[in-house]
Image (cartoon, rainbow, N blue to C red):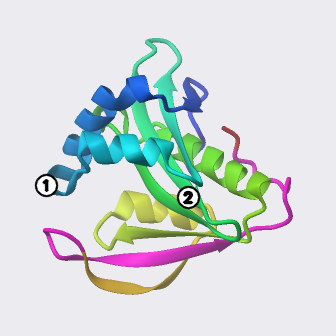
Amino acid sequence: MTEPDPGVVVRPLLHADLPVLDDFERELFGAGAWSRAALAEELEGPGRWYVGGQDATTGELIGYAGLWFDGVDAQVMTIGTTAGHQRRGVGAALLAALLGRARASGAEHVYLEVRVDNDPALRLYERAGFERMGRRRGYYQPENIDAWTMSLALGAPGADDEGLSA
């Protein structure tokens, strides 16, 4: 797995981050981006936990990720890194934080869906131990692109995240 960048600080996302998150959504997801109102609702939603990856030197928010926990299992809602900061381990740092939170919450499994053509994300998740479960047809709208559903069985709460740290 790509090692998390030690120059990235993972911190909870705040309501004040909404303008930056709104820009990220449009950059990363284009027409499928969530609105600012939907983002605000997600940040405050029950069972939701959102974090940002902040450049330790500049203080710039360069990535974000979200987790939903239903009391039994967790789901990765999103992991995104801005174009200028991809391939430096930001996604790995964010994923490590999500997995740590899922374990601390007592989740038995973590699930996610990722576009079938998103090779960097697939590599990140597979290196973290996620396995492909199946393919959802036409999941991503409006592009109508398929998604892989993936899962990771978690150990007991507090178990090591295979050397990943936030």
Asked whether the beta carbons under mark 2 and mark 1 sit within 8 Å of each other, the answer is no
Residue 145 location (% of width, % of height): 21, 75
The magenta region covers 140-164
Question: Does residue 11 lie above or below 156 as drawn?
Answer: above
Question: Does residue 128 lie above or below 2 as drawn?
Answer: below
Residue 165 location (% of width, % of height): 70, 41
What secondary structure is the stretch in magenta mostly built from? Answer: loop
Question: Does residue 26 lie above or below 67 as drawn?
Answer: above
* Amino acid bearing label 1: Ala
Is residue 46 magenta-colored?
A: no
Q: Please tell me which residue is depicted at 72% across the width and 65% down the height of the picture.
A: 107
Residue 162, visible in the rendered structure: no
Q: Which secondary structure lies at badge 1?
A: helix
Is residue 144 magenta-colored?
A: yes
Q: Residues within 10 Å of mark 1 (few under 14, many from 20)?
A: few
Snapshot quadrant of residue 141 = bottom left
Q: Which mark is residue 68?
A: 2
Q: Nearer the viewer, residue 76 or 128?
A: 76
* Amino acid bearing label 2: Trp
Q: Which mark is residue 158?
A: none
Q: Quadrant of the C terminus?
A: top right
Q: Please tell me which residue is depicted at 55% across the width and 43% down the height of the picture.
A: 94
User: For the residues marked 2 and 1, what is the alpha-carbon distance in whole angstroms?
Assistant: 23 Å
**Labels 2 and 1: the sequence-earlier one:** 1
Q: Residues within 10 Å of mark 2 (few under 14, many from 20)?
A: many
- Label 1: which residue? 31
Question: Does residue 63 lie above or below 17 as drawn?
Answer: below
Q: From the viewer's perspective, tell me whether residue 58 is left or right of residue 98.
A: left
Q: Please tell me which residue is depicted at 37% across the width and 33% down the height of the picture.
A: 85
In the image, which is nearer the foreground, mark 2 or mark 1? 2
Q: Please tell me which residue is depicted at 58% across the width and 62% down the height of the picture.
A: 127
